[in-house]
Amino acid sequence: MSANDIAALNAKFGIDNQIVFKTGAGGLTVAEVTNSYATATIVLQGAHLTRWTPRKQQPVIWLSPVAKFAAGKSIRGGVPICWPWFGPHASDAKLPGHGFARTVPWEVIASKAMQNGATQIAFRLVESDATRAQWPHASPVEFLITVGDTLAMQLITRNTSNAPITIGDALHTYFAVSDIREVYIHGLGQCPYLDKMDGGKRKQQNGPVVISAETDRIYLQSSADCVIEDIPWRRRIRISKYGSNSSIVWNPWLDKANAMGDFGPDGYLHMVCVESANAAEDVVTIAPGAEHRLSVTYHVESLK
């Protein structure tokens, strides 16, 4: 994007002392959000939030220190948007895993300084011949981010065609933790899950999730809050959601993280993905003229 385009974004959607558009790493355009509650960064490619740090707190969102920023490439960390399918495509293995939304341009369509001091910015996925070749359905998608003392995000898919469509989606959030070996994930007890480390076998969770090896699970019948309890940092990250009945918990652990090449030294120890999703048997069918909203709110609570 040219300097003139950034100037136009700032003129139309910039907000004094709250939203500034600039050229970021890899030449990608970013929106920097600052208010009395928190700071945040969103890359316009993928509408990809890479940072949310409430005032006087540790970062809540993990971004790899060696993340690669390049046109058409996914970013390791932050909140990648998985849409319009989760995981591998159901019938065409050549199509990108988790869909194309996280690697294509999104346009800013609105911004607002809210009365409570939070800051809101809205995006729409830019359709192209390439996206339509992968997803030939009339289903515009928007993403709304509200940065405040909580982080609220809403992925909105509308079906403007005359036939039902079925989507999978997820907010593939990488949460920052002090040390994954001292973290407990609550809220998934008694949920069945598909264990991708064991051939997709269906299992049952009992008690909190504790990670001590490569973990890749799709939790089903999961609509309650999830809570990441971080003992050394003396905090809980509460994940509340709506429009999602599955949750994914993922950590690549040492060998896979090293093989991926963009985690950095010991990066796997300082992150965990707890993804609010509609995945596996929890895909969503949207009737003509209807919409689906996947909504999350993240909130940090102190451990006493």
Image (tube, grey):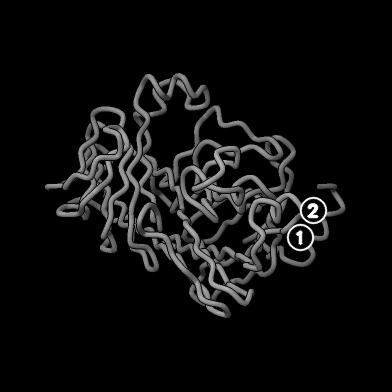
Q: Quadrant of residue 112?
A: bottom right
26 to the left or right of 84? right
* Residue type, mark 2 in image: Ile
Residue tagged 1: 10
Between 289 and 81, the one nearer to me in the picture? 289
Between 237 and 168, the one nearer to me in the picture? 168
297 to the left or right of 19? left
* Residue type, mark 1 in image: Asn
How many other residues sit within 10 Å of disc 2, few (<14), some (14-19) or many (≥20)? Answer: some
Q: Give percent across and percent down for residue 259.
A: 46, 19
Query: Can see residue 42?
Result: no
Residue at screen point 45% across, 63% down:
152
* In the image, farthest residue toward the left: 206
Residue at screen point 30% across, 34% down:
199
Residue tagged 2: 6
Query: Can see residue 283?
Result: yes
Q: Give percent across and percent down for residue 137.
A: 64, 64
Secondary structure of the residue carrying numbered label 2:
helix
Secondary structure of the residue carrying numbered label 1:
helix
Does the residue at mark 1 contact the one at mark 2 (Cβ under 8 Å)?
yes
* In the image, farthest residue toward the front: 91
How many other residues sit within 10 Å of disc 1, few (<14), some (14-19) or many (≥20)? Answer: some
